[in-house]
Image (tube, rainbow, N blue to C red):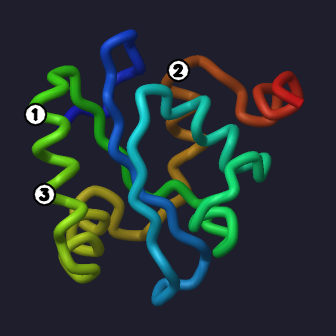
Amino acid sequence: MNNAPQTANSFWLYMLSNDTFQGPLYLGDTTDLTGRMVEHLKGERRDFAHYHKLEKLVYFESWSDPNKFAARLRRVRNWPRDMRILLIESLNPDWDELTGKLFDSMGMDKQELLKRSA
């Protein structure tokens, strides 16, 4: 796992939640995590996360090898909820919102990015 800045060959696995600890979790994958988060935050995606108002990025990991990423994604998708919670809490024990940290690490301002993509 690598939480390094995005590159052209990045594959991202991420999890979204809401402010309710016992609420639903969304497991997603993308090659552009910042772009995907903008879509989630602006409500452009009509998916499980949208309908359950899951906009809080609580976990993400990046992979450069597509085969290792696909294997990891299959593995995590088959995990029960409690295993996914353990994964989140291993790196984010307080369930902090990580979108700001993600954008900051890439030199982007979250509010400015949301305005520009309007």
Judge left or right: residue 93 versus residue 37: left
Mark earlier in primary sequence (1, 2):
1
Mark earlier in primary sequence (3, 2):
3
Amino acid type assigned to the residue bearing label 3 in the image: Arg
**Cα separation between marks 3 and 2:** 28 Å
| Position of 112 relative to 83 (above/below) | above
**Cα separation between marks 1 and 2:** 24 Å
Residue found at x 52% / y 55%: 57
Q: Secondary structure under badge 3?
A: helix
| Position of 61 relative to 115 (above/below) | below
Amino acid type assigned to the residue bearing label 2 in the image: Met
Q: Secondary structure under badge 1?
A: helix
In the rendered image, which residue does mark 2 sit on?
Answer: 106
In the rendered image, which residue does mark 1 sit on?
Answer: 68
Residue placed most toward the observer, 51 or 1: 51
**Cα separation between marks 3 and 1:** 11 Å
Mark linked to residue 21: none
Mark earlier in primary sequence (3, 1):
1
Q: Position of residue 83 (x, y in %)?
A: 18, 75
Q: Secondary structure under badge 2?
A: loop
| Position of 48 relative to 80 (above/below) | above
- Number of the front mark, 1 or 2: 1
Quadrant location of residue 35? top right
In the rendered image, which residue does mark 3 sit on?
Answer: 75
Judge left or right: residue 77 versus residue 6: left
